[in-house]
Image: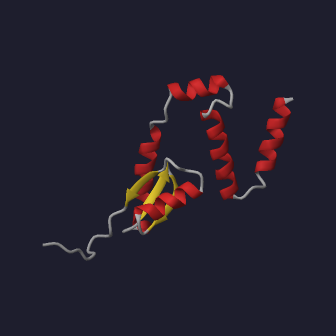
Amino acid sequence: MATELLRDLMARSSELTMEEKQRLAQYLSEQVKNGNGDEDSVSAQKRQPDHRKGQLSVAWLKSHGEEHAGQYVALDGDQLVGSGRTIRDAQTAAKDKGYPQALLVHVPPREGGTWGGW
């Protein structure tokens, strides 16, 4: 029965928008984290943290950083989940999309920009 339900949910999820898919993914992740999912999956997830997220974030910054020069970005691995003029703007955008633990990074302005100092 569960296999049929899973297949149905997967098929129906293809009709969702990207934002709705992100919300669903976040909801399911929270279910697993809170112990409302399969216990074997929970313990496996705790044993094997995803160390690749940092590497994926660095790769994303290298390839997309110029597009967001001078802004703050919120990343979940290689996925942009928020951005803004301030770190709070980026954090709020990420939380609104269901990513409260997103990596927040300031992308430096392009070279040749203006700066001030004493």
Q: Residue at x 46, y 39 (%)?
A: 52
Q: Residue furthest bottom?
A: 114
Q: Is residue 64 visible?
A: no
Position of residue 67 measured from the top left corner of the image (x, y, whole percent):
44, 68
Q: Front-most of 107 and 39? A: 39
Q: Eyeballing the image, is 51 above or below 96? A: above
Position of residue 88 measured from the top left corner of the image (x, y, whole percent):
44, 62
Does 87 sit left or right of 26 as displayed?
Answer: left
Q: Is residue 49 visible?
A: yes
Does 54 sit left or right of 96 as displayed?
Answer: left
Q: Front-most of 111 and 88? A: 88
Q: Residue at x 62, y 40 (%)?
A: 30
Position of residue 55 measured from the top left corner of the image (x, y, whole percent):
42, 44
Please tell me how many numbered marks the rendered image carries: 0
Q: Front-most of 75 and 90? A: 90
Q: Eyeballing the image, is 101 above or below 67? A: above
Q: How is the image coloured?
A: secondary structure
| Quadrant (top left, top right, bottom left, bottom right) of the N terminus | top right
Q: Residue at x 37, y 62 (%)?
A: 107
Does 118 sit left or right of 25 as displayed?
Answer: left
Position of residue 20 measured from the top left corner of the image (x, y, whole percent):
70, 55
Answer with the quarter of the image where residue 7 lies.
Answer: top right
